[in-house]
Each structure stands twice: as structure tokens, then as C-alpha cells.
Amino acid sequence: MDGIDFLWLHATNQMADEMQLLDVNDSAEPVSCYCCGRPSGEWAVPLYQQRIDSFIKLEVPVCAPCNALFHGSYRYMGIEKGTLEKPTTAGKLGMLVGCGLIVAQTQKILLTNPGWDKRLRAATVPLFEMHQVSGKGALEFALNRIIALGPEEFPLLYIADIGRKKADLVANLKLTHSKAQIRVCSGESVFRINTDLLHAIRTMQQQDKSGWKKLEGFIFSSCHGRIAPNDEGLHGFLSASPEALAIARSLPADPHEKLQLLRVI
Ligand SMILES: [Zn+2]
């Protein structure tokens, strides 16, 4: 299932009662979503809303699941602009820069930051349980939370930063099917975290700090093309450290994913 449909079916469809949704079956023309680009036959529900695109100033169809990112609602999403006493713009899920989201089968957690927390809590019917935890701590909180979940909570969707680039976010929404490999989605990228590998790295960080620093340096240099795979220093180091060798072997092949992983750790 597409991530944006999963989000709709598990959380955002509650907002349907405030949307001006149309049924594609009533349309004489084929309809494709302006945000996700999918033709209506691929949507989880045959519903869409006509929205004015702010750049081209024309009406465009947006499927109901994507529309939930654009929909402003004081009731469900609190306040985007203004104060608690004088709100001027309703909150929108697709504008929460710096906030994360975990939507599992029964748990729905919005990870807020100090800038958004109070405004989101103005919602009278919040869609999500809220935790104020941001920055690098938020990723660690989310990973620990996901790793602690039972198998019945999967598949789930984890967004590290909702951001405000809605179409980019939708394109990167990939479900996490088990805790063995967690997909970290955002408007910028989607990358995988192998939890066994994460555990092995954290163990090495604690037990052999200097060894880890050295391995980290090798990984970083190789990703930037500053070290050849046949580098003798690297080989000597790996053959002397079984822990480092095991970690090196289970690293993702893609340099971009390797660097993302280093950023997490
Ligand atoms: Zn869409």
C-alpha cells in the first residue's frame, strides 16, 4: 500500500467530515492527483478535492489522502499562525516543519518541537498523541519506540520530518514492515535503518570507542571517494577487529544510505 493511503486509512480520514470531497465516479473526465500524480484508480478511496494551487492559481484535483496534508483545521490540527487567543490560520499536517510522525496499527504519535507543540495542542480533537521531542533526540526516541513495538503494530509509517514539501514527502512515504528494517521518511529522502546493524554499532561505540571512530572515519572517507576499497590500512584494521568487519559487511551498499546512518549514530 502507498504510504499516503496508509496515513489516510489509519489517521487522517477523520478529517473527511471537514473536506469538500467529490467522487471520481461523478466525473466525466479521468482524474489524477496533482500532488501524488496517481490516477484515481490507484487511490485508496475514490475521493478528491478541488484546490487552488498557490503557484499556478488554478483549480487542481487532489486525492483525499494527499488533501489531508493541505487541509487546515483548528479542530484537528490546532493553530498554524497567530496566538492561542487570536488564531489567524488553522493548522495543517503538511506544514509541520521539524515534527515527526509514527503511525502504527493502533498507535499514532506526533513528535513535536517547542515551536509547534503549544499550537498543535490547541486542537480540540487531536488526530495524534503528542510528544515534545525534537532534533537528534527525536530520531532516537522514534527508533527506540518502534523497536519496542509488538509485531501486531506493523506495518507502520515513520516520518522523521514532515516538512512542508508535500509532493516530495508523499513520493518518499514508504512503509516499515518489521522492526528489522526501519524506513525513515521525509521530504528530503527515505532511507533504511537495519536495527541489528544499529545495535552492533552502538555496542562497538560503548566497548571500543577508538575502534569505532576509526571505522567511522573509513566509512566516511570511502563514501566521499577519498579511500579505495583495496586500501591496506582498512584491510589491516578490519582483519584485526571482528566487530568492525561484521559491521562493515552489513552496511548498506548505497553511499547515501551509509552517510544517513552515520548521521543517525
Ligand atoms: Zn494524491
Image: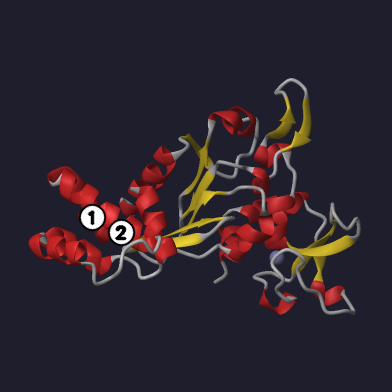
- Give the residue displayed 60% in from the left and 40% down from the top: 126
Quadrant location of residue 77?
Answer: top right
Q: Vertically, is 36 above or below 80?
A: below
Between 185 and 109, the one nearer to me in the picture: 185
Q: Which residue is mark 2?
A: 219
Taking 8 as reference, is 204 left or right? left
Quadrant location of residue 99?
Answer: top right
Taking 17 as reference, is 9 left or right? left
Q: Residue furthest top?
A: 85
User: In the image, residue 152 lies at what x, y percent?
Assistant: 37, 61
- Label 1 environment density (alpha carbons within 10 Å; few <14, some 14–19, many ≥20): many
Taking 227 as reference, is 75 left or right? right
Q: Amino acid at mark 2?
A: Ile
- Give the residue displayed 23% in from the left and 55% down from the top: 215
Q: Are marks 1 and 2 in contact (CB under 8 Å)?
A: yes
Q: Is residue 203 in view from this perspective?
A: no
Q: Quadrant of the N terminus?
A: bottom right
**Element marked by disc 2:** helix
- For ligand 1, the image quadrant comes to bottom right
C-alpha span from label 1 to label 2: 6 Å
Label ID, residue 102? none
Disc 2 residue: CB within 8 Å of ligand 1: no
**Element marked by disc 1:** helix
Q: Which residue is mark 1?
A: 215
Q: Amino acid at mark 1?
A: Leu
- Give the residue displayed 74% in from the left and 49% down from the top: 71
- Give the residue displayed 81% in from the left and 69% down from the top: 23
Between 17 and 174, the one nearer to me in the picture: 174
Disc 1 residue: CB within 8 Å of ligand 1: no
User: In the image, residue 116 lies at what x, y percent?
Assistant: 60, 33
User: In the image, residue 258 lies at what x, y percent?
Assistant: 37, 61
